[in-house]
Image (cartoon, grey):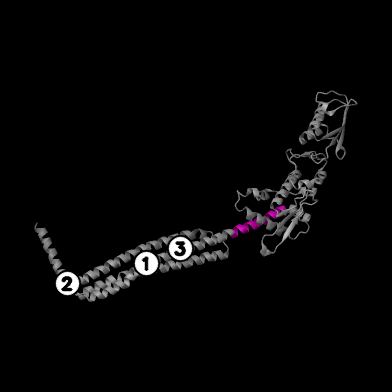
């Protein structure tokens, strides 16, 4: 396994000799230095390449037999870097970019070394170009997860990502991106937090992930619709990434707001139906009972045909009891009405407080709902008041009629009752 950091350390100890060829450098020293021994040993163990020649005091030796304790007067060797593609050591960024075809399908190696720039990617502080390179490779991998289709052929010269519009109302559209790496792209700043959060692996943590991925694709198509050519689209996207994120944020906010407003409208509709249903139950509960009013009035006729004051008195008492029970029932319904009114106020208060945040149609809808329910409440309250008055009408009519018809008998009865009371009081007084 290649140890890039060990190669970088050895190369620096040797004073970073220039490459005589694209992948080889020569080194010569005529004075003993233990650091050179350490560097040569690290080159051997780094597995980054091979020694073409290794001379100690003019004698060709096996590099693997050389160690930090070896003594010498002169040393010279030629080291050739492995060019098989598995060694992440590059002469410059241009050579690194030449390997970009393999990097667009997977993330760039975590550790690599740029010889001319003396940049080791695992060392802090990171060069901004290294940060951008890692971000670009992650972004391409994330975009592949978001794309509807992507080219799986590793031998293909171009890596294709296809995004298809899902909103048929806007017409079926699709765009193709050809992700690639170029040295010029390393000058831009890329953040991958958003696309990272949209990966399918986050589905359990984000229930709205499918909709957010759909909004991302729609935004991507909207943003790149005016650009032509897969590579040109990709370059435009990278160079204006921050603007794309703003557009996505606006589209997502629009969707969430619309979803929130739709939910609020449903809540208002449900609240309106609930309150109306409860008021309807109040009316239903009293509709059967108020029939006792005309029945009681019909009984009043029987009072006029009563043959004795006792018979008439029993009829009047029955009507009084009926009126009292009906009045109590209506009083209970009035309390129920008050509870319904209070519940309505609680249901709509939160929406009224947030009404300034709602669109005009939703504000108008809430206002109309409250007005309609308030009108129903006023009508129900008036009906309950009138019915409570009417509930006593039969009793009042019956008592009046009874007293008019049997006035003489009632007066005699009252006199006898008064005499009886006085007699009892006299007895108690004497005692």
Q: Which residue is mark 3?
A: 275
Q: Position of residue 355 (x, y in %)?
A: 54, 61
Q: Is residue 195 left or right of residue 288?
A: right
Q: Is residue 114 above or below residue 202?
A: above
- Could you give the CA–CA distance between mark 3 and mark 2, rounded to whole angstroms? 54 Å
Q: Is residue 14 left or right of residue 170?
A: right
Q: Which residues are magenta?
A: 241-258
Q: Which residue is mark 1?
A: 286
Seen as rendered, the residue at the extreme left is: 430
Q: What residue do we see at 11% from left, 63% from top?
A: 423
User: Judging from the image, what secondary structure is the residue with disc 2 in?
Assistant: helix
How dense is the environment of label 1, judged by Cα within 10 Å: few (below 14), some, or many (20 and up)?
Answer: some
Nearer mark to the viewer, of 3 and 1 = 1
Residue 418 visible in image:
yes
Q: What secondary structure prevails in the magenta region?
A: helix
Q: Nearer the viewer, residue 29 or 166?
A: 166
Q: Position of residue 223 (x, y in %)?
A: 71, 58
Which labelled disc corresponds to residue 411?
A: 2
Residue 357 visible in image:
no
Q: Nearer the viewer, residue 189 or 394?
A: 394
């Amino acid at each position: 396994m290649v140890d890039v950091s060990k190669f970088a350390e050895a190369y620096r100890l040797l004073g970073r000799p220039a490459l005589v060829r694209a992948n080889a450098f020569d080194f010569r020293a005529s004075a003993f230095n233990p650091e050179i021994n350490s560097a040569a040993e690290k080159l051997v163990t780094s597995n980054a390449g091979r020694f073409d020649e290794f001379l100690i005091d003019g004698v060709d030796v096996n590099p693997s037999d050389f160690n930090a304790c070896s003594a010498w007067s002169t040393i010279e060797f030629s080291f050739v870097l492995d060019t098989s593609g598995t060694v992440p050591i590059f002469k410059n960024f241009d050579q690194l970019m030449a390997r970009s075809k393999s990097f667009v399908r997977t993330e760039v190696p975590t550790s690599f070394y740029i010889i001319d720039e003396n940049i080791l990617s695992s060392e802090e502080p990171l060069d901004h170009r290294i940060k951008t390179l890692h971000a670009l490779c992650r972004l391409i991998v994330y975009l592949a997860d978001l794309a509807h289709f992507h080219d799986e052929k590793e031998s293909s010269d171009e890596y294709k990502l296809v995004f298809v519009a899902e909103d048929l109302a806007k017409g079926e559209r699709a765009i193709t991106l050809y992700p690639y790496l170029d040295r010029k792209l390393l000058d831009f700043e890329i953040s991958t937090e958003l696309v990272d959060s949209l990966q399918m692996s986050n589905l359990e943590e984000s229930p709205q992930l499918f909709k957010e991925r759909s909004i991302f694709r729609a935004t991507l198509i909207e943003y790149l619709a005016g650009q032509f050519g897969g590579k040109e689209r990709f370059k435009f996207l990278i160079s204006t990434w921050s603007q794309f994120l703003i557009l996505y944020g606006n589209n997502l906010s629009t969707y969430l707001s619309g979803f929130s407003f739709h939910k609020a409208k449903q809540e208002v509709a449900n609240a309106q139906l609930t309150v109306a249903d409860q008021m309807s139950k109040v009316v239903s509960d009293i509709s059967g009972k108020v029939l006792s009013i005309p029945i009681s009035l019909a009984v009043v006729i029987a009072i006029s045909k009563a043959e004795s004051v006792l018979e008439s008195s029993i009829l009047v008492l029955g009507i009084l009891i009926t009126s009292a029970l009906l009045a109590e029932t209506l009083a209970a319904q009035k309390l129920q009405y008050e509870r319904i009114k209070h519940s309505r106020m609680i249901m709509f208060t939160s929406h009224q407080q947030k009404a300034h945040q709602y669109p005009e149609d939703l504000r108008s809808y809430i206002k109309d709902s409250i007005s309609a329910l308030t009108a129903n409440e006023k009508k129900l309250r008036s009906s309950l008041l009138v019915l409570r008055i009417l509930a006593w009408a039969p009793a009042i009519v019956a008592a009046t009629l009874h007293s008019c018809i049997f006035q003489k008998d009632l007066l005699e009865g009252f006199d006898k009752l008064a005499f009886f009371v006085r007699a009892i009081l006299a007895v108690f007084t004497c005692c």
